[in-house]
Amino acid sequence: MKSHLTIDRFRIWLAVILLGILTLGTIWVMEVIRRNGDDEQNRSSARSAPDYYVEKFNFIRLSNNGKANYHITGDSLVHLPRNDNIEIKHPQINSFDQDRPPLHLRADLAVVSQKSNVITPKREHDEVHLYDNVSMERPEGLSSQFVHVESEYLLLLPDDDIVKTDKPITITTGKSTSTATGMLANNSTQHLALLSKVRIALKKREAVNAVKTK
């Protein structure tokens, strides 16, 4: 009888011990998962955080042939390592290539996507995305007329000297004011195409009063 009771107690205690081991194992697994999740979140946060920050900067961008062609200034610049983008507050971009008409661009925000073989898909060239209160101005020159463009978004491709958008724009020249949705402007060839919903208002000629002299 005593032997039977002893075996039953042994079985009960064995079950309790196994249950305890199972419980501790479950707690340990959950703790490992939690720590791994925290580590991954911390690494993700670290990648998302800017790795450098510059205020009141001046930057000269070199073209592929090593010739300086864009002067960029702004209130602040931050680099985001996760996507290798640069964000610029209140950017001002001026081109000064002697072989091309100058351009002056302003915006509230610029996001520069740099050329990279690391990013997937890789980037073949630099892209400058301009957002909010965007303006582009080309002064009058010997072979070009004054042009002023306003939009909420413009994309500058510095290597190709192209500015384009798929958003509504307003274009003012010396003789007309045009509105459209979508634009493609090539500063090298001085070619400008309005893509859709184009409306053009021609300015009236100023009346000229003839003055008779005796």
Image: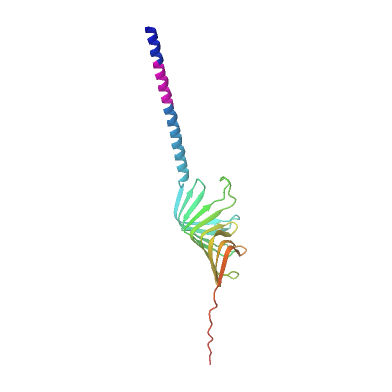
Q: Where is residue 107? Give x, y as percent.
A: 48, 60
- Residue projecting furthest to the right: 189
Residue 24's image quarter?
top left
- Residue projecting furthest to the bottom: 214
> Is residue 133 depicted above or below 33 in this figure?
below
Residue shown at the point (44%, 31%) measured from the top left: 32
> Who is closer to the viewer here, 143 or 182?
182
Magenta span: 12-25
> Is residue 41 depicted above or below 87 in this figure?
above
Residue shown at the point (41%, 22%) measured from the top left: 19
Q: How many marks?
A: 0
> Does 204 appear in magenta?
no
Q: Where is residue 104? Give x, y as percent.
A: 52, 63
> Is residue 7 depicted above or below 114 in this figure?
above
Q: Where is residue 128? Give x, y as percent.
A: 53, 55
> Who is closer to the viewer here, 5 or 96?
5
> Does 21 appear in magenta?
yes
> Is residue 47 depicted above or below 204 in this figure?
above
- Image quadrant holding the N terminus, namely top left
Residue shown at the point (45%, 29%) measured from the top left: 29
> Who is closer to the viewer here, 124 or 130?
130
Q: Where is residue 153? Give x, y as percent.
A: 52, 58
Give the dominant element type of the magenta stretch: helix, strand or loop: helix
